[in-house]
Amino acid sequence: MSTPGALLAADKSPPLASVRYVKLPLDVSQVHAAEELIHNAGITEDGRLVWTSSGQTDPGSPSSRLCEPVFERYCRLVVVSDTHDLHSSLPRPLPKGDVLLHCGDFCNEGTDAEWCRFDSWIAAQALAVGCGDRVFCVAGNHDGPRRRHGMPRSAALPSANLLEAQLAKKKLLASTGLRLFGLSWHEGCRALPEPRVDVLMTHGPPAGILDANNGGHSCGDPSLLELLRSCPDAPRLHVFGHIHEAYGAQLCDFGDRRSLLLNVSNAAPPVPGMGWEVTYLAWPVTVIDMELPPLCSE
Ligand SMILES: [Zn+2]
């Protein structure tokens, strides 16, 4: 994969921030490498995507699909993760899309003030992205305990749907037919719900997949890997963050199903010897156009 986007770190208002764009077909089995699905794009001031080629942006020729979100055949997911209370340094605006996802570690210390700031920010992003109430998050290890002031932590995030270990009901299903399952930190899950989940969202990676830290150690969750392996119908897409230095994409076979796994961390990788502290966001926002199941394609 590419190196961290110095553009975002060095210049808070780049003319065209970079985006990792993924076009995910219904059938991933014919795809042989994740790179076949991934393209570089940029974001215009009004939140449209434009293709970049040969390192050059070309704002004059956005593809027709990239102009605005549609539900006809594709659902556009705008995905961020590990913003560690630095959300405001993400590109503004975020790209237009149908669904906005945050894979956790929106806080750094997990304080009430950080939850509040994130709630305000995500409410504003939902408007900018144009995704209505299709905003889904999972909590990460930096987001504090499962309960806050005696209440479920989801109550502290009124502007988004915080998925603990559950399906995104109705809001996503009704409009797109997609089944999204979110699994927050501190939650366990022995089996994904039937029928097939299309998108799995967790904070951390499964063991051995996009989970290597700077020291080369695998930091992923063995039980999450087992969950995917034991699933009769593995999700087409699994998005997660947590290991900032393992941003990337990988195709994996679970049984006879091929899945795309994406580490979508935005936080800059830790500098060896300098601790884990996140001081800026470096990796591009990920935008995924998912081909919809036949149910909604006509
Ligand atoms: Zn993190």
Image (spheres, rainbow, N blue to C red):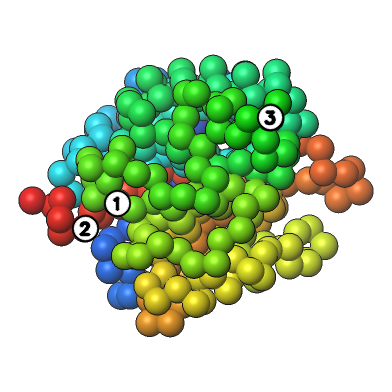
Give the residue type at disc 1.
Leu
The local crowd at label 3, few if under 14, some if 14 to 19, many if 20 or more residues have their Cα within 10 Å, is few
CA–CA distance between discs 3 and 1?
33 Å
Q: Residue at x 28, y 61 (%)?
A: 25
Give the residue type at disc 2.
Pro
Say whether residue 9 is visible.
no
Give the farthest residue toward the bottom: 255
CA–CA distance between discs 2 and 3?
40 Å
Q: Residue at x 78, y 67 (%)?
A: 217
Q: Position of residue 144 (x, y in %)?
A: 73, 36
Q: Looking at the image, which is closer to me, 127 or 188?
A: 188
Q: Position of residue 201 (x, y in %)?
A: 50, 51
Give the farthest residue toward the front: 150
State the mark number for residue 150.
3
Mark found first going from the N terminus, 2 or 1 = 1
**Which structural element holds mark 2?**
loop
Q: Position of residue 11 (x, y in %)?
A: 62, 24
Decide: marks 2, 1 in contact (CB < 8 A)?
A: yes
